[in-house]
Image: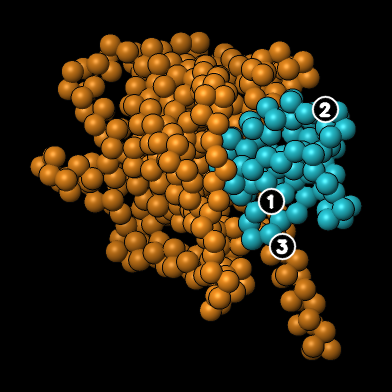
Chain colours: A cyan, B orange
């Protein structure tokens, strides 16, 4: 999916934080949003590259898009 | 014909390079490799550890500050310090070759946590007679029962650390940290030259090992290479012991539990062969204060590793990737460990916390391997059940 066309309902900026904080914040944040809404997680820890997709798979959320530029990741997670 | 041969060779090299440095290696591959490396280090010298090297660096910091007067071992002649150098260097090389090296700053709160985590881990490692590698991984691998006590402590410490982080997120909602903007006018394209620097450093490290060899210090030179390999493996697979203890409480995931258990299974069976045949003295490496020291040490260490976000090994490889928070952790770890251990020794505290207990002496060799395998399998089964049921997940 083209990420340009995704509009996030909520944004979580975890830049500068390293493992496990981005994952913890993502899990905590996603609990507060409604099903079907999209959370954009921004991060700079290379660990997130695996952690966040793995978490989505396990928790059943849909990873609708991801981008990476200059070491900054954007993940778009649609809550199940 | 010639052009097509070179063309296809170049294609093959590119493909191989991308497999090795373009994507992360599966964790289980790293688990197998690390067990083999740990066995080779055991056969070559003595069981693998990391905290001892940190302590050597801490001793030097005190010496430079004028706190102590005795000159510590030279870092490049201290075996654990040399494997640590290798591990750092290996990760640095791997990060460069996979274009992931970047100096990464963070907020004041995170630096403080990095320092506190290092101080706690330095203390915990002094109690347990080793860190997550020497006190847990190698301890279990060479049948020192302190390893199991530390394992329980690490789990409990990780749980408490996670509870703390959850509390902290509510109590101090941190503002997003934005890295200082990089100047757009760069004289060279960093992402293109990174792998070349990586290659140069790799050659330098191998050259370093050869220099040791030429100076009749082959044993230390090879340890540098073992450390280098461990660093490459750990960075490429993002091998994190912390995850084996934290994830069951955080996301429920048990992948690292399975990987560490598999790795230990190989380590243990290999070391049984070594010990049974007296290739190395059979109680070598069995010194961990079982059980109070190891348990308490694990608890303190486990809490600390959640604060810093890296244990003794992942602190090193993450520094190799450019995380400045973990540089602070390393300094805290080294200074504390170098201070706490001598205090504990001079007041004979360690003796009161337990003594090195050898599993085959307790349950006999007949039962050692079944008991050893059973504990690891039980750990995997319970955590795999938790992965589905999420019974232990803290939030």
Q: Is residue B59 visible?
A: yes
Q: Helix, strand or loop at disc 2?
A: loop
CB under 8 Å between discs 2 and 1: no
Q: Helix, strand or loop at disc 3?
A: helix
- Residue holding disc 3: B18
Q: Tell which tag, 3 or 1, sits nearer the viewer.
A: 1
The chain containing the residue under callout 1 comes to: A
Q: Is residue A64 left or right of residue B47?
A: right
The chain containing the residue under callout 3 comes to: B
- Residue holding disc 2: A34
- Residue holding disc 1: A73
The structure residue drawn at horizontal position 51% and vertical position 52%, both measured from the top left corner, is B104
- Mark 2 is surrounded, within 10 Å at the Cα level, by few (under 14), some (14 to 19) or many (20 or more) other residues, namely few
Q: Position of residue B308 (x, y in %)?
A: 47, 35
Residue B234, relative to residue B369: is it above or below? below
The structure residue drawn at horizontal position 48% and vertical position 50%, both measured from the top left corner, is B105
Q: Is residue B119 left or right of residue B20?
A: left
Q: Position of residue B211 (x, y in %)?
A: 35, 66
In this figure, what is the number of numbered marks? 3
| Displayed quadrant of residue B176 | top right
């Amino acid at each position: 999916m083209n990420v340009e066309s995704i509009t996030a309902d909520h944004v979580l900026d975890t830049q500068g934080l390293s493992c496990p904080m981005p994952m913890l914040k993502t899990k905590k944040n996603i609990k507060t949003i409604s099903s079907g809404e999209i959370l954009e997680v921004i991060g700079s820890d290379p660990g997130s590259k695996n952690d966040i997709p793995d978490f989505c798979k396990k928790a059943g959320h849909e990873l609708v898009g991801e981008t990476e530029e200059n070491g900054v990741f954007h993940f778009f997670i649609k809550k199940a | 014909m010639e052009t097509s041969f070179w063309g296809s060779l170049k294609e093959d090299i590119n493909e191989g390079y991308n497999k090795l440095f373009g994507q992360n290696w599966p964790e289980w591959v790293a688990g197998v490799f690390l067990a083999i490396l740990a066995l080779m280090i055991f056969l070559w010298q003595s069981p693998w550890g990391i905290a001892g090297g940190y302590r050597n660096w801490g001793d030097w910091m005190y010496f430079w500050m004028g706190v102590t007067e005795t000159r510590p071992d030279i870092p490049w002649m201290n075996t654990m310090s040399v494997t640590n150098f290798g591990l750092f260097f290996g990760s640095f090389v791997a990060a460069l070759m996979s274009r992931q090296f970047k100096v990464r700053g963070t907020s004041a709160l995170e630096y403080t946590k990095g320092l506190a985590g290092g101080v706690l881990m330095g203390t915990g490692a002094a109690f347990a007679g080793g860190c997550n590698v020497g006190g847990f991984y190698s301890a279990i691998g060479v049948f020192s029962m302190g390893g199991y006590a530390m394992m329980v402590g690490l789990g409990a410490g990780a749980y408490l650390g996670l509870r703390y982080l959850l509390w902290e997120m509510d109590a101090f909602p941190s503002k997003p940290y934005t890295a200082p903007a990089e100047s757009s006018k760069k004289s060279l394209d960093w992402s293109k030259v990174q792998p070349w620097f990586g290659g140069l450093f790799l050659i330098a490290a191998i050259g370093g090992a050869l220099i040791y060899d030429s100076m009749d210090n082959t044993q230390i030179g090879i340890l540098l290479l073992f450390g280098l390999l461990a660093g490459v493996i750990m960075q490429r697979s993002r091998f994190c012991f912390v995850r084996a203890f934290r994830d069951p409480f955080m996301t429920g995931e048990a992948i690292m539990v399975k990987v560490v258990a598999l790795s230990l299974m190989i380590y243990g069976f290999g070391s049984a062969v070594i010990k049974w045949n007296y290739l190395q003295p059979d109680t070598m490496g069995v010194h961990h204060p079982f059980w109070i020291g190891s348990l308490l040490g694990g608890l303190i260490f486990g809490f600390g590793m959640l604060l810093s976000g890296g244990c003794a090994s992942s602190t090193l490889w993450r520094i190799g990737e450019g995380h400045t928070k973990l540089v602070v952790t390393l300094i805290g770890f080294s200074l504390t460990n170098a201070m706490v251990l001598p205090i504990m020794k001079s007041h004979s505290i360690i003796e009161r916390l337990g003594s090195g207990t050898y599993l085959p002496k307790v349950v006999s060799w007949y039962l050692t391997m079944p008991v050893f395998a059973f504990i690891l399998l039980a750990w995997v089964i319970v955590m795999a059940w938790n992965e589905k049921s999420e019974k232990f997940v803290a939030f």
